[in-house]
Image: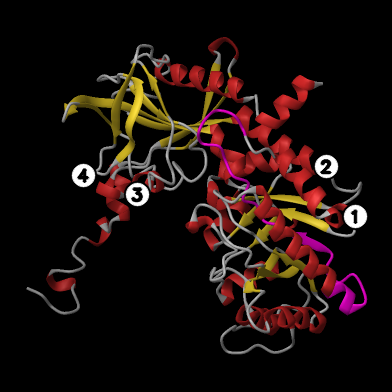
Amino acid sequence: MGAHIEAEETGNSGAGRAARRDEAVRAAVEQGLLGPDSPIIGLLDVTGIRESAAELRAAFDAVVAPGTPVLHAFAVKATPLVPVLRLLREEGVGAEVASPGELALARAAGLGPEMTVLDSPAKTPGELREALALGIAVNADNPQELDRIDALMIPHSPKDVGGAPIAASRSPLGIRVNPQIGGGSIEATSTATATSKFGVALRDEGAREWVVRAYLDRPWLTRLHAHTGSQGVPLSLMARGVAETYGLAEEINRRAGRRQVDTLDIGGGLPVNFASDATTPTYAQYARTLAEEVPGLFDGRYGLVTEFGRSLLAKHGTVVARVEYAKSAGGRPVALTHAGVQVATRTVYAPGVWPLRIAAYDSKGRPKEGPAVVQDVAGPACFSGDLLAEGCALPLLEQGDFAAALDTGAYYFAHHYAYNSLVRPAIYGFGPGGERRVAFAVVREAQTVEEVVAESGGAQVDALVGGRAPWGLP
């Protein structure tokens, strides 16, 4: 029993995940996916993703009352890749989308309206109309957005909405609120601060009463949504945000004299440990914390929606880049690789907040051995701060070796930054492969330079000069 508890609490599956990663890097080199002509790729551990989805479901199944409707909706922004969304759908996980593009990705992956939630602080009339027509759950961010929804739900349509109203939308509708309970250690990922751009700020004068009145005036508002933050926000603060949201739902229902709010969307935001292979905190720890701090949340009176993103995918992704050159500057070794700001934008621009672990592999893709040497691991972009890691202690990386940026399954290789017109790398999922040990599936093809030209106006080469230009330049 003690060993089981230890594994659950500390995420001891990290050793198995590291072993699978090492096998995948070696297999990628052996099978020609990684080498001189393809010097950077992304890898996704399919087994690990399935395990995380199962752990998420099990953690909340253990605390909710039997029969409680629960939707775990993956935050698509974390890894906006159609095959990933399809895999998660097969594991019983839906999609939380925040743009027309993300909604299109979710639909392409086969996710139905009942498994989709639309959250965004700036939805256009067209986006709202599409969501309501499809029957997708929508959380209104502010009073002006609620006015737009009103116009689509009643038999007239103001100019700023346009078109005929939705006669009978199946969409579950709610309001996003900001409990204003404060931020975590990373300001940019804290969404419940006093001046956060998200939701209705509950502690502002008159705001809480406006929210309650909005529900009392609209019997079709049945959900309440809050998201306290993401990386850098401790479990205690996340639980406080959920508790505030639960208390508001109780107040609305008490004043309505019935159970009008029937579902609470508690967002996501479980932090990820980027310091080692251990998974901590775990979904089980968070679910138990919520059960202790907000016991009424799980007594069966409220359906539940979660919106986890980074915690589901981060530890199951690796960016692997070939060392093109190895040199020295100021007495410090520098490994020049093909992974930099284009795949690790947050890390390069804010290394103190978003540091990455780097693993060293030799030219055959095997974990590199040798004494640790303090060195820099640099990217290919043309500015000096393009560093994956600075002063990193690793076996000395040499020309032809590989540097792997770990825990990059979320917010890294799927969010390309086109500095220097660097192409987007290919992404492969990997899993057991029988005789070959590891099998790969293409998740996203590598971008070509021809596609870079096309995206950069290649078809409009004469748009600003010559006779085609409207201002008639010679």
In the picture of the structure, the residue carrying the numbered disc 4 is 382
At x 57% / y 52%, what residue is drawn? 230
Tell me if mark 3 has few (under 14), some (14-19) or many (20+) residues whose alpha carbon lies within 10 angstroms of its own.
some
The residue range painted magenta reads 252-279
Looking at the image, tell me whether mark 4 or mark 2 is earlier in sequence order: 2
User: Is 211 situated above or below 386?
Assistant: below
Number of numbered labels in the structure image: 4
Distance from Cα at disc 1 to Cα at disc 4 = 56 Å
Q: For the residues labelled 1 and 3, say whether their Cβ atoms are less than 8 Å apart.
A: no
- For the residues labelled 3 and 2, the Cα–Cα distance comes to 39 Å
Q: Earlier in the sequence, mark 1 or mark 4?
A: 1
- The residue to which callout 2 is attached is 61
The amino acid type of the residue labelled 2 equals Asp
Q: Quadrant of the C terminus?
A: bottom left
Cα separation, mark 1 vs mark 2, equals 12 Å
Please say whether residue 110 is visible from this viewpoint.
Answer: no
